Image (cartoon, rainbow, N blue to C red):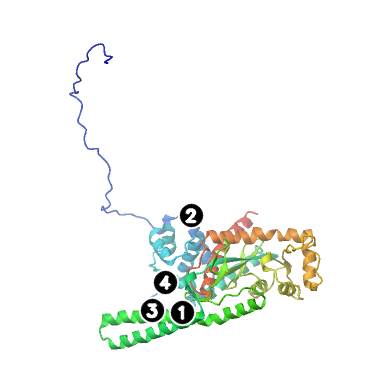
Amino acid sequence: MDDTLFELPPTEPDEHEEAPGVPRLQVPNRGQLELRSVDLDGLLGPDHRARLVWAFVEGLDLGRLYARIKAIEGHPGRPPIDPAILVALWLYATLEGVGSARALDRLCAEHDAYRWLAGGVGLNYHTLAAFRVEHADVLDRLLTESVAALLADGLVTLQAVAQDGVRVRAAAGAASYRRRDRLERFLAQAEAQVRALKDELDDDPAGSSRRVAAARERAARERAERVRHALAHLPEIEATKKRNAKRGKPTPEARTSTTDPQARVMKMADGGWRPAYNAQLATDTASQVIVGLDVTPIGNDQGQLGPMVRQLRRRYGRAPRAWLADAGFLANSEIEEFAAPGCGTTLYLPVRTPEDPGRDPYLPLPSDSAAVAAWRTRMSTPAAKEIYKARAATAECVNAIARNRGLQRFRVRGQAKARAILLWFALAHNLMRTIALRSAAATI
C-alpha cells in the first residue's frame, strides 16, 4: 500500500550538475632524472653508532694487517681495501646482527651507515667473507690489547671473572654424519671420479669444455678432501666412545660429518641434538667486558676452567682473584688445580644437591680430597654465596646479548673459523662496553 497522500512530480536532472570525470592524481614517475648534492658525511648524525665504531677502530693498532699488504708504493699491484674499513664494517655488522658477507655487501650499496663506513670504496662479498676469517690471530691480539687498555685505566679489574659456555649450531647437517665404512666407500668413489675427470680434462681440447671439466674436477677433488678430513677426525671420536663404554655409557658407532668434521652433535638448549660447537666466554663481572674466549668441539663444560684461567694469565700477565662458573663445570681435578699453590684464583662453584635429601651437601665426604673439602666448606658461607650471585648477572647477560646479535649459528666451517667469528662478537661487545664505561667515568 502506498503511504503517499499526493502524487510527487518526477525528478528532473539539475542542468548545472557536471558529469563525473576522471580524478586528477599525482602518479609516480620513476623514469625521471634527479640530481642530488649530498656528501656521505652528511648522511649520518653526529652521534650515530657508525661514527662510534669508526672512532673505536681508529684507536686500534692495525699495523699487523697493514704489514701483510703486498702492494706498496713504487711497485706494481692493485691497491687493496684499507683494513680499517673492513674491520669497521664487520664490527658494525656484528652489532646490527648481520652475519652474512652477501648481506653486508648489499648493505654497503643501500644503507647509509654502511656506505659511510665504506667511504665510497668498492667492495664485494668475496673480500668481506675472506677477511672475516683470515686474520684470527690479529683479532685475538686486538682483544688482548683493548682489554689491557681498560685494565690500565682501571675500568676492568679482573677481581672476579665469570665463565659460561654457549652451544652454537654448526654449519653442518645431521645427515652429513657417516660411519667409517660409508666414509671409506665415499672416498673411493670420489677418488675414482677425480681420476676420471682428470683424464677427460686431458683428452678434451675444446676450451669451453675444458673449463667445465676443470670445474667438475675441482668440485670432485674438494669432496674427496672433505671425506679425508672426516676420516682423519674419526679416530678421536672412536677413542671417546671407548672411554664412555668403559664407564658403562651407551656407545653408538662413531660417526663424523663430511661437511664439518670438527663439529660434534651436542644437546642444545631446547633439548634437541644438533651439530654444534661449544663457545666459551670469560667476562669480568664488574665491567661485563669479555676478557677471554675459546671454541671447542666438546659438548660439556667440564675441563674448560683451567685452560681459560691459563689463557687469561698469558694475555694479561695475571689471573683473576675469583672465578665463577655454574655446576656444569664441576670437576674434582679442576678444583684441585685451582687450589694448587701459585694459582692465585679462588673458585666459586655451586655444590650439587645430593641424591640423599638428608645429607648436608656442604659437609665433606670421606672420599673428598683436601681441596674438594675446602671448596665445599667455602661454598657454605654467606660470603661465597653473595659473590656467586654475580655469575648469572654477568655470564648469562653476555650470552643473551650475543644471541640477540646473531650468535645462533656459525656460517663457517671448522673450529678455527668459528673461533674467528666469536672474536668478532667479543670485539663488538667490548666496543659498546668501552663506550659505556668511559662515558660513565667521564661523568664522575
Q: Secondary structure at mark 2?
A: loop
Q: Image quadrant for the C terminus?
A: bottom right
Distance Cα–Cα, label 1 vs label 4: 24 Å
Q: Secondary structure at mark 3?
A: helix
Mark 1: amino acid: Arg
User: Callout 3: 10 Å neighbours few (<14), some, many (20+)?
Assistant: some
Q: Which mark is residue 219?
A: 3
User: Callout 2: 10 Å neighbours few (<14), some, many (20+)?
Assistant: few
* Residue, disc 2: 46
Distance Cα–Cα, label 3 vs label 2: 49 Å
Place of residue 284 in the rendered image (x, y in percent of width and height, measured from the top left): 65, 64
Query: Upstream in the sequence, badge 1 or badge 3?
Result: 3
Distance Cα–Cα, label 1 vs label 3: 11 Å
Place of residue 101 in the rendered image (x, y in percent of width and height, measured from the top left): 43, 67
Mark 2: amino acid: Pro
Q: Residue furthest top?
A: 5
Query: Upstream in the sequence, badge 2 or badge 1?
Result: 2
Q: Are marks 1 and 4 in contact (CB under 8 Å)?
A: no
Query: Upstream in the sequence, badge 2 or badge 4?
Result: 2
Query: Upstream in the sequence, badge 1 or badge 4?
Result: 4
- Is label 3 or label 4 in front? 3
Does residue 22 appear to the left or right of 258 in the view shown? left
Task: Let me know if residue 59 appears in the view.
Answer: no
